[in-house]
Image (cartoon, rainbow, N blue to C red):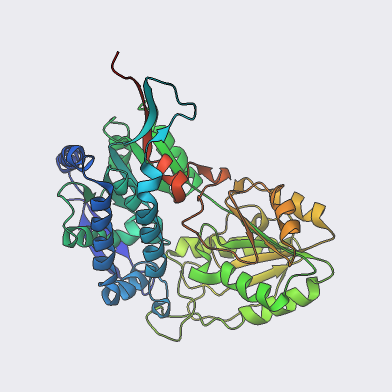
Amino acid sequence: METVKIKSPVDGSIYAERPLATDQAINAAVERARAAQEKWAETPVVERGKHMLAMLEALVAMTDEIVPEIAWQMGRPVRYGGEFGGVRERTSYMVEIAEAALKPVMASNPKDGFRRYVQKVPLGVVMVIAPWNYPYLTAVNTIVPALMAGSAVILKHAAQTLLVGERFQQAFDKAGLPKGLFQNLVMNHAQTEKLLGSGKIDHVNFTGSVGGGRAIEKAAAGTFMTLGLELGGKDPAYVLPDARMDHAVANLVDGAFYNSGQCCCGIERVYVHEKVYDEFVEGFIAETRNYVVGNPLEQATTMGPMAQARFADLIREQKAEALRKGAKAHINMKVANDTAGSPYLAPEVLTGVDHQMSVMREESFGPIVGIMKVRNDEEAIALMNDSPYGLTASIWTGDIEHAVAIGDRVETGTVFMNRCDYLDPALVWTGVKDTGKGAALSAIGYDNLTRPKSYHLREAI
């Protein structure tokens, strides 16, 4: 029997192993989902919400088990306590707005003798293909609103974080969700592509690489299913002369290196106005040197290993290329096991970088950041837009109107001012260019997880 193994980045051991679902089991799961969804669509939205909140409480109750489990699976230090602050915020908000977001849209020009409106109906069976980097947060973005909208959900989690899918299943089972509405399946790429091409799935949400997104589109070709794709990122920050420097430094260091830089909306490149460049770089370097890299199961550790050694090796290659082309490395921290082929990697700050270097153009998804000096807004905007990606951009200034004016010209899905690396569930989460398509969270997220159905009703003649 073919299995999927979790190789822990902590010590290279096999932390868990699970058998792949058989093709028969996958087909049966889809049939159960379809049957359960028909009844679920008739369930009042308020009742659906009660199940979601019960699932949330069941999940949070497992925190003591889940936190070290995450560390073993993908390396995040236990001191950060999991992801349940964000999971609670997003779940609660999407439940709270569901009734209003899903209500019929009445025609804006009433006509005597007619009732005309657009109903938002469930898509049917939604498949969520979730990533390992924030395995709970990214999954819940679609799981909860899809169920709230009246669909059934099939979850295929990343091989690196297989146990997360099981935790979701346990939580939904404890919450008493009707059988078949949520199902966790262990599948490989070939099985996933086959299922997507079968025409049995109505919507797929994928969070992952650009290459993975293209594979999803190819697999789904001809089925006419709807797609939600959150793909790569190379998120920039621009620090202006009037920024509060201590605040900008602290938050941008955290935005660059939290979770070992393995965040789709993490800061990967920083542009600093020449008037404050030296001060910013000095503070950024000093703050970065405070990181303690090591075993994520120890409370003192603030940066654990990357999820896989090959991800760390990519960062090593980007750094080496930048140095060959004239960049300067400022941290050069000595860390045990920080050698080629190891997932343990120290954070690095580079200056003297430019856009001829891969570290400023290609996704790093790791603990490395380049800082460039700019003369003015025009130069900063041009550099921020010189990227195939567009998820978020952050602007650091005391002038809101100035930030909005800059943000209007930046090609991105979200504009931040004086913060970064955060999802507000009241705002839509989306991207442009190679970052993908679709939208999650907010009322707009519900529009992407429902199908509009028009009712044009002539009253009694």
- Residue visible at 38% across and 63% down? 87
- Residue visible at 50% across and 51% down? 429
Residue nearer the viewer, 42 or 272: 42
- On the image, the x and y values in percent for residue 420 come to 59, 64
In the picture as drawn, the residue positioned furthest to the top comes out as: 461
- On the image, the x and y values in percent for residue 176 come to 16, 57
Residue nearer the viewer, 131 or 251: 251
213 sits left or right of 370 in the view: left
- On the image, the x and y values in percent for residue 413 come to 58, 48
- On the image, the x and y values in percent for residue 12 come to 35, 70
- Residue visible at 32% across and 36% down? 123
Q: In this view of the protein, can residue 457 be seen by the observer?
A: yes
374 sits left or right of 394 in the view: right
Task: Tell me where residue 454 sits by quadrant.
Answer: top left
Q: In this view of the protein, can residue 139 be seen by the observer?
A: no
48 sits left or right of 451 in the view: left
Q: Quadrant of the C terminus?
A: top left
- How many numbered discs, if any? 0
Residue nearer the viewer, 105 or 333: 105
Q: Is residue 414 above or below residue 279?
A: above
- Residue visible at 66% across and 48% down? 387
